[in-house]
Image (cartoon, rainbow, N blue to C red):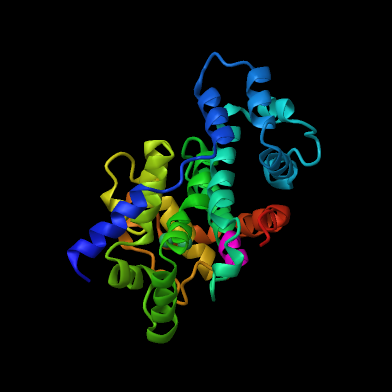
């Protein structure tokens, strides 16, 4: 592939859709330390579809407050601004890119893909908790969004995406290799362009960009390393479908960064199973 054509595709990536206006406003207010619960709730409630998804999500047993939250102010009080903001950001990511994509997705299993995202998020959170890393909810969001670049590629480069899937299926390539061959970049890069455009926190952007090469992170290698492990475990456990036929191998640097032995992960498996079972509601949130 010529350099010029790669550059043209990257230019397309820089032209990604922005956050919907209502979501953008809610995120801005959520960043303001002086904002009141009332101001925030009003800005979120302007977007009906967002509001109903947030309420469904926060009432799923995942957050441990099942069925108790009836409105947005309660969600803000019980879960905190940070969790609500991250929830809105990740919901929007999938909402913007999955809407209307069903007919165009060809052989790509969007439901399986969403399950892979949720499963990776849950496993990342359980691993972060067992490693006693701060803010385990942030690891959930990083896992949820780690492969968002695949949806970006599906949306912007449809025919190339179909060719990538063909290489994966017929030639047994990892999706990452097929993407590089066909596009000249991979879904980590495509996802990081979206993260940049949507002003996601740097830590989250790096986790998305570097979940296959966690040792390259400048800021904090732990988040990409946890997401890397979670991605592989999720595929290994058969939860959802990430577009790969091969289960991505765990790179040794991920274990080194976390000072972890592969065998010690086995101790987390019962909790991972239980959390995934509890997240059944969440798994169908974006049934397409
Ligand atoms: Fe990936
Ligand atoms: Fe993945």
Q: Is residue 245 left or right of residue 271?
A: left
Image spot of residue 128 (x, y percent): 49, 45
The quarter of the rendered structure image containing the C terminus is bottom right
At x 69%, y 28%, the residue is 78
Give yes or no for residue 282 being in the magenta stretch: no
Q: Quadrant of residue 84?
A: top right
Q: Is residue 185 left or right of residue 94?
A: left
Q: In the rendered image, is residue 239 in sight?
A: no
At x 60%, y 55%, the residue is 99
Image spot of residue 179 (x, y percent): 34, 68
Residue 11 to residue 158: above or below: above
Q: Nearer the viewer, residue 32 or 118?
A: 32
Q: Nearer the viewer, residue 88 or 138?
A: 88
Q: Is residue 136 left or right of residue 201?
A: right
User: Of all residues shown, which one is farthest toward the left?
Assistant: 3
Residue 190 to residue 59: above or below: below
Give yes or no for residue 112 being in the magenta stretch: yes
Q: Nearer the viewer, residue 185 or 48?
A: 48
Prevailing secondary structure of the magenta residues: helix
Magenta part of the chain: 110-115
Figure quadrant, ligand 1: bottom left
Q: Quadrant of residue 150?
A: bottom left
Q: In the rendered image, is residue 160 in sight?
A: yes
Residue 287 to residue 200: above or below: below
User: Of all residues shown, which one is farthest toward the top?
Assistant: 34
Image spot of residue 137 (x, y percent): 55, 40
The quarter of the rendered structure image containing the N terminus is bottom left
User: Of all residues shown, which one is farthest toward the bottom?
Assistant: 170
Image spot of residue 79 (x, y percent): 65, 31
At x 55%, y 68%, the residue is 104
At x 53%, y 48%, the residue is 93
């Amino acid at each position: 592939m010529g350099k010029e054509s790669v550059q043209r595709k990257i230019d397309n990536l820089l032209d990604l859709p922005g956050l919907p206006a209502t979501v953008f406003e809610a995120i801005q207010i959520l960043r303001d330390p002086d904002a009141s619960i009332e101001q925030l709730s009003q800005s979120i409630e302007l977007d009906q579809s967002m509001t109903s998804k947030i309420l469904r999500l926060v009432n799923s047993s995942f957050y441990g407050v099942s069925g108790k939250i009836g409105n947005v102010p309660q969600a803000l009080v019980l879960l905190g601004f940070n969790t609500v903001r991250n929830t809105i950001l990740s919901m929007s990511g999938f909402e913007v890119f999955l809407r209307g994509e069903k007919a165009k997705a060809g052989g790509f299993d969007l439901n399986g893909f969403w399950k892979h995202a949720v499963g990776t998020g849950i496993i990342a959170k359980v691993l972060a908790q067992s490693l006693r890393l701060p803010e385990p909810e942030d690891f959930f969001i990083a896992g949820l969004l780690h492969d968002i670049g695949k949806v970006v590629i599906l949306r912007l480069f449809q025919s190339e995406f179909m060719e990538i899937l063909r290489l994966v299926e017929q030639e047994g390539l990892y999706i990452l290799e097929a993407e590089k061959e066909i596009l000249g970049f991979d879904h980590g890069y495509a996802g990081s362009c979206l993260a940049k455009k949507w002003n996601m926190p740097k830590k989250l952007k790096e986790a998305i960009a570097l979940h296959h090469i966690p040792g390259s992170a400048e800021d904090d290698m732990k988040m990409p390393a946890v997401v890397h492990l979670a991605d592989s475990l999720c595929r290994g456990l058969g939860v959802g479908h990430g577009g790969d036929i091969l289960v991505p191998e765990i790179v040794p640097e991920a274990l080194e960064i976390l000072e972890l032995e592969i065998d010690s992960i086995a101790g987390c498996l019962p909790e991972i199973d239980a959390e995934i079972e509890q997240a059944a509601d969440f798994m169908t949130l974006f049934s397409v």
